[in-house]
Amino acid sequence: MPAPTLQTPRLTLRAILPEDRPALTAILADPVAMEHMHYRHWNEAQRERWVDMALEIAAQPDADSVLWIIELTETGDVIGWFGMGNPARPDLAGDLSFEDVLARSHWNQGLMTEAMRAVFAHAFDALGVPRINANCHPANGGSARVMEKAGMRFLDAKSTPDQEGTWREQRYFRITRADWDASAR
């Protein structure tokens, strides 16, 4: 699915470009920002391969996932990303799932909630998605709060493997089309 440009009052969410590499690898290299992510132990080569993969997927017209770069509209600074695609859990087939990362220097400003709500609006209104799911590590209270502020509800906690096969406890959240329609946009 192609990455349409989404605008919020402070942000532009857009397709990834090769010139985003330095900002993305810097975010991936921040041990505090990556503390609860599977990227936390990656070396420089792994971070570079991730950006290469993201660029390759973005170039595919029929990719089943999309990665938006989050940039501050006022400055053009890349401050994070928001990726959405098919869920990792087979019991959530038909839904979309996401992962998001924000540079630490931009935490606690409501920026990720703003980005998340823009993506939700696109997913529900333009794509007609029935449900969106996400998860976070139990110790990642900031991520859980952002999901709840964006309208998601806690579903359950399960131990599941991350993208590298490491089993970890995860908290699962969901927002349905009905939840979105009922929320004050």
Image (cartoon, grey):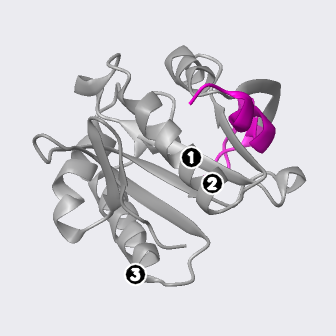
Quadrant of residue 34 within the rendered picture: top left
Gap between marks 3 and 2 measured at Cα: 24 Å
What residue is disc 1 on? 121
Residue 67 makes an appearance in the image: yes
Q: Nearer the viewer, residue 10 or 26?
A: 10
Q: Nearer the viewer, residue 26 or 174?
A: 174
User: Is residue 181 part of the magenta span, yes or no?
Assistant: yes
Q: Residue 10: where, in percent of width, then height?
A: 26, 35
What residue is disc 3 on? 59
Gap between marks 3 and 1 measured at Cα: 24 Å
Quadrant of residue 128 within the rendered picture: bottom right
Residue at image coords 16%, 65%: 19
Image quadrant where one finds the N terminus? bottom right
Q: Which mark is residue 125?
A: 2
Q: Secondary structure at mark 2?
A: helix
Image quadrant where one finds the C terminus? top right
Mark 2 touching mark 1, by CB under 8 A?
yes
The number of numbered badges drawn on the structure is 3
Quadrant of residue 33 within the rendered picture: top left
- Please state if 136 lies on the left or on the right of 99 as rendered: right
Q: Point out the stretch of residues depicted in magenta.
A: 160-185
Q: Residue 159: where, in percent of width, then height?
A: 79, 33
Of the residues tagged 3 and 1, which is closer to the observer?
1
For badge 2, the amino acid type reads: Asp
Q: Nearer the viewer, residue 54 or 182?
A: 182
